[in-house]
Every structure is written in C-alpha cells, then in structure tokens.
Amino acid sequence: MATITDAVESKPKRQVIERAVVRFCGDSGDGMQISGSQFTNTVALYGNDLATFPDFPAEIRAPAGTLPGVSGFQVQFSSSDVYTPGDAVDVLVAMNPAALKMNIKDLKKNGILIVNSDSFGENDLRKAHQATNPLEDHSLDAYRVFPVQLERLTQTALEELGLDAKSMNRCKNFFALGMCYWLYNRSMDHTYRWLDDKFKNKPLLAEANKRAMKAGYSYCEATEAFQVSYEIPPAKLAPGVYRNLSGNQALAMGFVVAAQKAGLQLFLGSYPITPASDILHELSGYKNFGVLTFQAEDEIAAITSAIGAAYSGALAMTTTSGPGMALKTEAMGLAVAVELPIVVCDIQRGGPSTGLPTKTEQADLLQAMFGRNSEAPIPILAPSTPGDCFWIALEASRIALKYMVPVIVLSDGYLANGAEPWRIPNLAEIPQIPVHFVTDPQGFLPYKRDPQTLARPWAIPGTPGLEHRIGGLEKQDVTGNVNYEPLNHEKMVRLRAAKVEAIGQDVPDVVPAGDPDGDLLIIGWGSTYGSITAALKAQRAAGHRIGHVHLRYLNPLPRNLGQVMERYSKVLVPEMNMGQLSMILRAKYLVDAEGYNKIQGQPFKQAELEAKIEEVLSYGAVGTGRNGR
Amino acid sequence: MSATVPVLTKKDFQTDQEVRWCPGCGDYAILSAVQSVFPELGIPREKFVVVSGIGCSSRFPYYMNTFGFHTIHGRAPAVATGIKVAHPELEVWVATGDGDSLSIGGNHTIHMLRRNVGIKVLMFNNRIYGLTKGQYSPTSEFGKKTKSTPFGSGARPFNPLALAIGAETTFVARSVDVMQQHLKETLKKAAAHKGAAYIEILQNCNIFNDGAWQYLTEKDARSEHIVQLEHGKPLIFGKNRDKGIRMNGLDLEVVQLGSGVSEHDLLIHDEQYRNPAYAFLLAKMEEMPGFPTPIGVLRSWNDVPRYEDIMANQVKDVVAKRGAGDIDKLLRSGDTWEVR
C-alpha cells in the first residue's frame, strides 16, 4: 500500500465542475442522516448553493440490512443556483446490498458508486432479496464502482482506541464521509468541530469518528482509487450572512420573531406527529424567549389549548400533520365562530389515514379549504422553500392577528426536513405586527367589527368592564349574544366569508416568473417551487414561452390571478396530489387548468416536469386556455 | 392584595340573558350557589373566566357575568388549560356534565387533573344526556333503560370521584344541588384550593331522569343515606347520628354507636391523607350495600405544585440561566458564513 506521502506527490488531477449530487444511503442505524447533514453543512460553509432531500423510513429501526430499513440523504450543491436536490446522483454511497438495490436506479450512468464491500456476504444479500452478488454479477457495469472494506478499514483505523467492535462499526459512516470530503476537496474542520461539540462528554467517541473520517480521506489519497477529484467553486449568492435552515426550524424561528414583533407571548399547543414534531422540539428549547410549549394529551387538546391561549391574549399556534389535522377540524370551526387568532401548521405527509408518515405529499389542500362542518372559511398560506417557512410564519401570524381569524399554514415533509442556505434577515427590516387589546368598556361590543378588516375586538380576560361571553353557538351580529334568527345566521355566515375575502387586500398581485405571457402558465404551490423553477429555466432556454406563478396565498387567492391566467394559452398545475389546486382554479375561474399529478411520496423531478411541459405544448392551442389563443 | 377590590354582590354576577334551563332543573340551584359564592372570594370580577363544553350544564357561562367561553363538546378542560397556562393570574372555572366530562371529554379531564392545572371543575352529574333528550350517560346505572338503551344499558358506570382520585387530583369533593349551604361551603373550599379541583355536584334532571338522586336527597332520607365528611371529625350519620363508619382490616364497615362502640372507634376524616387508598375507599363506599354516600371534601392536597407555575418557573429559570432571548443571536445560531 502506498504511503500518504507518496500519494501527495502523485496527487490525481483536480477538475472544476459546476454542480454535483451526492447521496448517502444505508440502514436507518448507519448514520446516513448525520453523514449527509455534515457534508451539507461543510459545502454550505464553503459557499455553495444547495438543496437537500433526507428520505427515511417510518420505522425507527427496521431489521438491519432489509429493504424497508433503508435511509437516504441527498444533497445537490453548486457554484450556481440550486432549486432541487437533483434528479440523478453523481456519487452514491451505499452501505449495504439493500441500500444499493433501493438507490442504484438514481445513479447516473458512469456515476461513482462507493459500496461497503464488507456487507455483501450471503446473509446480507439474502436480507436484501438479492439472488446474486451485484458486485460480481456485472449488473453494475454501467457505473464506476469502488468497493471499499468500510468496516475493516474503520476497525484498523481505530484499533488503538480500545473501543468495542460495535462502537467501532458505528464510525464507518464517517469513513465514507471522509472519502466524500476528499472527492470534493473539502476541509474536515467543520465536522471536527461538530464532533467535539456533539461528544463533549465522550471525547473517545469524538476521537474515534475523527480518526475514521481522516482514515477515509487518507484512503482516497493513498490508494489513488479515484483518478480525479472535483472542485465546485462558491456560488454567487446575494450578499449577506447565511446559515443552513430546514423548513421546520424556519417555522419555529419565524413564530418566535412574530411573537416578538407583535409584543405577545408565543404559545404552542402540540401533540407529537411526524413530520411536524421538530417544530415542537425547537420551540420547547426557546424558553428564554418566553415561549410556552404545551405537549397536549391529544391533537384536539393541542388546538383547543391554543384557542384558550389566544382567547387570553397570546400568539397561539398548533402544529400537526394530516391525521392530526383531521382531528382538529371541529376546533378549527370553533376558532372560526369565536373569531380568535390562531395559526395551524399542517406539515403534510402521504395519506389517507396513517399513510406514509415520513414521505411528502400536498393532499391536504382541500381539507384545509373545506374540511369543517358547515361554512367555515379559513385563510391558507403555503411556503415554497425551507427558508420561506420563516416568512410564512410571520405572515400567517400577521394575518391572524390583524383579521382575528385562524390561519392554516400548509407545509410538507419535503420542506420540513429539506434544507437550503438562507440569508439571515436584519431584524430591523421586519415590520412590527400591530396588536390592539380593547380596554375601554365604553361602547364595547364583542362582535362590533373594524370596517376595513371586519375583525372583531380582542377583549382579553382580566380587563375590567369587558366581561362578556363567547362560544360556538351562532351569535347575534354586533352584540355576540346567542341568536338563532334565520336572517342573522345568513348575515353572520356571509360576514365570516367576507372577512376572509378581505384579506385579499393584503395579498400581493402575482407576477409570473419567466415569460409574462405566452404558451403556458405553470401554477404551483408549496414545495414544488424548486422543481418547477428548474424545469421552467430549462424549457425557456429551449425556446418555449412559459410563465410560472407560485402561490403562497391559497385562500384567498391573489386578486389578479384570473387576469394573469388569461395571458397564456394553457395552464398546467403540477401537484403532489390528485389535482386539488387545479380543482379550485377550474371551479373559481372556469379555466381549463390541466393537472400534472404525482402521488408517490416523492417530490417532482425536474425531468418529469420538463417532459410534461413538452407534452402539453405539443397538443396545440385549440380549446385549452380560457382565451383559447 | 389590592385594597381597591370593589365590594361585589350576587347581582354583579348575573347576566341579562334569559336563563333557558327547564323549569325545575337542578342547574338553577347550582347557578345561584356559584353567583352567591363568587362575590365573597375577594377577587375582581374581571379575573373570573368560566369555561364550558356542550350540554345543559355548559350553558352556564352565558348566565355568569364574568368572562365566559362556551367551547365544544368535552374540550373545556383543554381550552381552560390554555387560558390558565397563558395567564396563571386568572381564576378559571369549568362547568361541565357527566357526558361532557366523562365521555367525550374523558381524556382532557384526566390529563388536566393529573397535571394539577389550577382550574376548578364543576361536574353536574344527572346521570343522563339531557340536551340530546335522554340517552344513557357514563354515570347511568347498569341496566338503565333510556331512549338509546330500551332494554337496559350494558355498561358499568364510572364513579367520577374514583376516576378523579385515580388521576391524582389534588382536590376532590362532592355536593348536592338541593343542599345549598353545603354546596356553597364546598365551592368556597374549592376556590381556596390552589391546584386542580374536581367537584361532583349531584343534580336532578326533572325531565329525562327525574329523581336521579332522590333516594339520598329526600329530606327524610338524607341523614340516613348521606355521610358528611368533615376534616378531623369522625364519620357519623343517621337520623339520630347514631351510626358510624370504621376501619375493619382494609375495609370500611358501618357500625351502630353505643353498645360498646364509641366515636373514638370511628374513622376520623383526614382530607390530606397521602395514601390514595384512603380517598378511594371513601369514593367507592356508596357502591356497597348499607353504606351512605359521602359528600364534602374527600381529598385536599395543597402542597402539589401547579402546572402553570411549573411552566412559568421554567421560563424564568431558563431566562436566569441563559439570559433573555436575543432573537438576532437566535437567527445567527449554528454555522453561518458571509457572502460579500
């Protein structure tokens, strides 16, 4: 074996490239999420733009080595803009045959495959339902395969530390990480620091992981396994200070900022549910910001406690995912009736029922729109990127407080766990959120409305002279007293609808990305933003006239949306559902919006969207768009 | 305490809303007792919040001139928890019934109680669903014939106080709609309790379950069928106060006073007794043949911290330890890099 010194002298050539996609995959217990996020943070600190896609099973630890237990983490990083984690993978790290089997289809032809050859024994192959050994049966001939004895090499690197075999084996993900750092010429310093911090109280483990990583790095250098290493220069991002941020972190921080800007205490009522729980975890750690987090006994108590907190003057919120959203419906109706400001965050996942807890979907839109008894309209906002979750949290809070309404935020598993570089805003740039608690008993009536917003006054308990009763029974206009009169009921139903419509005055007009008019308008919402943006760019470069509107406000819709649609011959609505936004658009605008629907628990690939765009444009213009151009 | 607390009267707690319970309903008596007790507590009216769920009893807030919130079926304890945690200085009372509290709201009830949130729950127990017109409730007797159980209910009833004791409730009491003085005294004791209080109020529904508690509330029968619990006093009952209850091994037994049995042999009530078996024995006593139904305070533990205080203190402690949150620092936490 060559020594390290020898290797440095004959260092392989370094090639500058624009972008790369790396995926780590292995067993749920192999530490793939850690390797992936360490790699991500390192390339982020270096200045690359990036997008990530952690994809893991619902089972915490399915039996080792089996297909259901495979966990993956993918990152695309680049010297130019990154909109998606990438369709296909340049470098695949596979820790066992099951991971290889599940992921190999996404590796580009001639892509680099690093496999842990120590886990390709008969037993490992059987667990992955592999009849033959892919390392020997020529099924991988289309790729550049690097079988590495990750377990044995890691053990050798750690033998002086006196760790048991199991602990040593758990460091092999860092060996693989070290190899990737070498491959992309990245410093290990960030991960060294992270390990020191993570294992402050277990310095031996910090040392073990460092040695494993260093060994992986040196292995590449010493063995000259790779003919070439890659260099991806920093991206030209807008000036500012950046950090990496996931959607759930962004939501949590957004609400803390919103509470501060409103001068209110933040109250979260929540019940653990994937993939929303991280918001509860994050906010529970922010006690020094005065945040009250209440882990309730169930989803219903989570939202009703938030309603109680809102009633007594807090910025109140609840977080959940689809099944929990279903349980909260009656309470959302109560919030509509009593006109109290709460924010309901639904981090959507695949359904129905328990469905695909860790996979993404956008199929709760119609539930958010209509999933309550009777006429109970609620404004709906949807973030389009992980970083946008921060701004949506602020906007949802602002609308709730200004209009005295419950507001639904529809995020999803892909945004929740995905991360991107995020420019840290200057706090002073973020406007205050005005809040007014009524205190004057003179002329106070619980349902006397502000003429512009139709909001009722917020009269919190403890205010002398404002004692009053509210509840879920129909109320008389203005007084709020219980009232069953037919005309009063119709008036109140219409008022509650008008109040949500009034929010439209705050919704900015949409300005399409790409062409301002043309052959096709793509309308998206939520986490499909990245894929649509990437596809739009490529298709416009190919000469098509296409625009893209990404809706952050789903209820009420932007007031100019109808006019914008008329400027294009066709309207295409890609969604990770069976066509929910397209149904709304067709119903509201009588437009022949065509759906493109993927319901696989996986985000759209850029190539899929491009193929669909080409297909739609090839139909010809007859009888498609509203103006039939 | 501020000296500016105005002198309040019962009238200050009455609203202009027409009370819409059936004539003769036991709820009127409970409303009257609460409206009499609140002004005596020395608490400004605006600090009171009355929260309810759904059911006849849950119309209660509309008739109380305080802050009031008529929420949805079963959820009052959860709404009240949100109010109390966000504003521990408020005086939060829940009005609920046997169906609201023990069926649809059973989960919220036990969790609010075990957390010891400083909320007082008035559970109007008429052993029937009144507002939906007469179905059996979780406290209806086994075999009870109702509209929904024409051949008799096959479900064993909950013993509400045993349930509350099982949930580690720090204040557990029982009173009766028609025993105004006792009810008022019990409400005052509940008001003085810091933590969670669960008060079962035996209440008659003269439309769908008339005579629900007649066997023990009839003037003549009362003294024979009710034993009034008083802290530090022996358990004595009977028209001539000649019967008592004493321990026999791990069981209770009814004994005749005189003929060699004196008050000194009887069980002396201790509402602070820590062994949960004690309050549980009291709660289950009425289910045994020949035993009276206990009313009054079964348990009062005043040294258990309240949930809302624990929450508030945690915030204070973390602020003391880490300093008040700096949002700018929060946004810049973790690894950051600058693009010029």
Image (cartoon, rainbow, N blue to C red):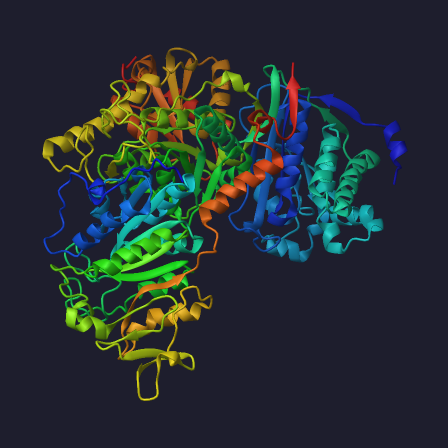
**Position of the N terminus of chain A by quadrant:** top right
Q: How many marks?
A: 0
Q: Residue furthest front?
A: B3
The residue nearer to you, when weighing A610 against A451, is A451
For the question of whether residue A371 can be seen, the reply is: no
The residue nearer to you, when weighing A33 against B196, is B196
Q: Residue furthest bottom?
A: B259
Whole-percent x, y for residue A446 in the image: 24, 30
Give me the residue at 43% from left, 64% from top.
B272
Whole-percent x, y for residue A328 in the image: 34, 43
Q: Which of the 4 quarters of the picture holds residue B170?
A: bottom left
| A80 lies left or right of B152 | right
Q: Is residue A47 above or below residue B171?
A: above
| B43 lies left or right of A262 | left
**Position of the C terminus of chain A by quadrant:** top left
Give me the residue at 13% from left, 60% from top.
B208
Give me the residue at 33% from left, 38% from top.
B5
The residue nearer to you, when weighing B94 against A566, is B94
Q: Is residue A346 above or below residue B162?
A: above
Whole-percent x, y for residue B61 in the image: 24, 44
Whole-percent x, y for residue B121 in the image: 32, 53
The residue nearer to you, when weighing B103 against A532, is B103
Q: Which of the 4 quarters of the picture holds residue A418?
A: top right
For the question of whether residue B184 can be seen, the reply is: yes
